[in-house]
Image (cartoon, helix red, strand yellow):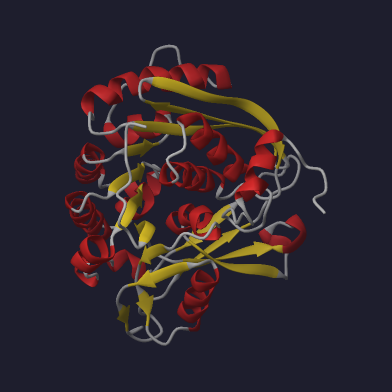
Amino acid sequence: MSITVKNDYRYAIACPTSMGVRLTPENRMAVAGSTRFYLTSTSAETNVLNVASSLGKQCLAMTKYVEGSPIAAFIRAQLRARNIDSVGATVPQGGPWGYRHQFNIADSGFGLRAPRVWNDRAGEVGRTLSADDFDLDQIFNKDGVGILHISGLIAAMSSETTRCCQKIAKAAKAAGTLISFDLNYRATFWKGREEELSAAFHELASITDILIGNEEDFQLCLGFKGPEAGGKDLTDKIEGFKGMISQVKEKYPNAKVFATTLRQVISANEHLWGAILLADDEWQVVEPRLIQVMDRIGGGDAFTGGLLYGILQSWNWQDCLHFGWASGVMAASSLNDYAEPADEKQLWDIYAGNARVQR
């Protein structure tokens, strides 16, 4: 394996993140037609942590809370239940029109009715996240972190979170922590900030060890030109990704691992799901397979979480990719937007297609 996780760490994976809650209608109903909703705490970054935390590894969310908020108390309790520690500042709400935690309102879709997601992030406390909110020396040098994971969502959320991610990544790098960066382009976050964010994402990618994103992410976040032979077919996407990474490797030589998922939507209930990875100059591919979907949200984050778990375990690259693929399938089989395996075997059974009852 071309990358090595440091031996002395308290936290297997840490991430800067803005926590919120997700409301999902029961029984795959549409939001507008529902009166009963399922509430969970959520963030793209902690969804990545959840594979390792479920399998017994201590993980850390670096975040911010609203003082006295029952939603903040709910989020803290949910993270504790998921074996994820959290650290960060607690700030006063500042009145009814002050700070709060985001609401993510999303239905799962059904058949040819697509899932719909509505993000309500006005006044979100996580947009004010700062590296000064954390004791970086304590976290990265004294406690130790195996992998720092950064999502393009938190890196692009505001000018404050962009600077925060840059400073945290530099501190992690100096301490010998591996850095994982999921580009995760989101047009609404980039609007009007293209030049600023292009420079920031370039800086983050330059010190990243594990770079995750699809062909469009690399084009829109880092300015690469897409290969001429692109297409919507999954085979074309595989070849397009390979062509893209040949450019990326040259520009970002520090990165040793490149990966993405492959998804073709047949209906809200059925997807073709695959994955591809390049490491040590060898390509690993899981050809797209038909999977059943309860709720698609979080599948990509769970894939990343499974991949990072394999790296923490020093597995070979094929096993890392297969485990990541299976973690994504598990997240898609749940109303929660993260995978929560009971043990490694559960995920290996998913990869093997073994759905027989376990007694």
Q: Position of residue 147 (x, y in %)?
A: 34, 50
* Foreground residue among 21 and 46: 46
Query: Residue most toward the top?
Result: 229
Q: Which residue appears at 45% of the width and 78% of the height?
A: 72
Q: Quadrant of the C terminus?
A: bottom right
Q: Which residue appears at 22% of the width and 41% of the height?
A: 207
- Vertical relation: 106 (above or below) 250: below
Q: Position of residue 171 (x, y in %)?
A: 19, 56
- Vertical relation: 68 (above or below) 355: below
* Foreground residue among 113 and 157: 157
Q: Position of residue 243 (x, y in %)?
A: 38, 17
> Does residue 253 appear left or right of residue 285 in this picture?
left
- Whether residue 301 appears in this view of the structure is yes
Q: Position of residue 86 (x, y in %)?
A: 39, 70
- Vertical relation: 114 (above or below) 8: above
Q: Which residue appears at 50% of the width and 21% of the height?
A: 238
Query: Residue most toward the front?
Result: 7
Count of numbered marks: 0
Q: Quadrant of the N terminus?
A: top left
Quadrant in the rendering for residue 350 = top right
